Image (cartoon, rainbow, N blue to C red):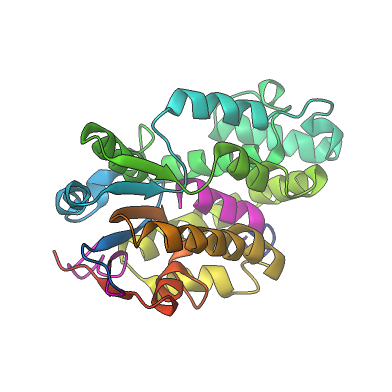
Amino acid sequence: MLMNHSLIKTIVAFFFLNFYVAGFAQLFWKISGNGLVTPSYLFGTHHLIDKSQIVDYDKIIARIDSVDAEVGEMDMTNMLGLQMKMAKAAIMKDIALDNLISENDYKIVAESFDSVVGVSMEKLKRMKPAMLSALYEVKLYMNATESKKEPAPADLEFQKRAKKLKKEIIGLETIDQQMGILFDSVPLREQADDLVQTVKNKQNSIADIQKLTNDYLSGNLDALNELSINEDQMTDAEKKLLIYDRNNNWVEQFKSLLPHKSCFIAVGCLHLTGEQGLIQQLRNLGYVVTPVEL
């Protein structure tokens, strides 16, 4: 359950974590006012949602044609390079999972990985537990939704469109910064304990991911905000690390970007919500932030 391993759940949303029609009006926003000649846009993403599930996707991605730059959490145009760096960052050099948890817990995890992921834990046990948890929950989600392949996330499609149009592509963070947050900010033993809880509470994990997905597909920012403010879901330290500090860093970059170029900004949906979310922080800077009508 989230209350037992909230950081891992948030990492999953982070990895994987829209419109005038009823379901999506609250996830696609226009940024105007405050001296802007051309509006910018803000879109909340969910990395496990295939672009085909997004209502009016063609109209949304077409807004990239009218801006100067596409802005994402990272520049993903060199996916091979990113994947190589991620693989390197996810490896434990001097220890393996069976050194971090009990023999019985290792057996439980290994058996569940074999059935859910279809890969022997002996091949994976040197991966950092946070990465294993993310891999496990993605496969849980895909199995629960009978997905045959990983989705084509909107984040990447937006950048492909921008690259084709020769637009500037801006990453708010580097891969090294993201990997540091995901894999190195929590001690390995704590990551391993969270992995064990993820596996032991498999059905709860499926329910939690499905709820996040349903809230996203219904455009329910209030429900999504509960994930980021509920003490049972995320500790204050986790909120600061994964959401608030990053939001603050991104807003500092927006201060320099928005006055000089129009942007299509696509970041995880949890970053939009609440008093410290990007929507409110942009309003605090004097911008008018309103749902886009398509």
Estimate the x, y position of residue 41 in percent, counting from the top left: 28, 60
65 and 21: which one is in front? 65
Q: Is residue 240 above or below residue 164?
A: below
Residue found 30% across the figure and 70% down from its top? 26
- Say whether residue 52 is left or right of residue 209: left
Residue 14 included in the magenta stretch of the image? yes
Residue found 42% across the figure and 27% down from its top? 78
Quadrant for the N terminus, please: bottom right
Q: Is residue 125 above or below residue 31?
A: above
273 and 170: which one is in front? 170
Q: How many numbered dots are placed on residues in this image?
A: 0
- Say whether residue 134 is left or right of residue 292: right
Is residue 211 in view? Answer: no
**What is the magenta range?**
7-34
Residue found 23% across the figure and 32% down from its top? 164
Quadrant for the C terminus, please: bottom left
Residue 51, quarter of picture = top left
Is residue 263 in view? Answer: yes
Estimate the x, y position of residue 53 in percent, counting from the top left: 25, 50
- Say whether residue 15 is left or right of residue 52: right
Residue found 50% across the figure and 42% down from its top? 138
210 and 72: which one is in front? 72
191 and 146: which one is in front? 191
Estimate the x, y position of residue 261 in percent, counting from the top left: 30, 54
Q: Is residue 81 above or below residue 256?
A: above
Residue 94, quarter of picture = top right
Residue 27 included in the magenta stretch of the image? yes
Hey, which residue is sitting farthest top in the picture? 123
Estimate the x, y position of residue 282 in percent, counting from the top left: 41, 71
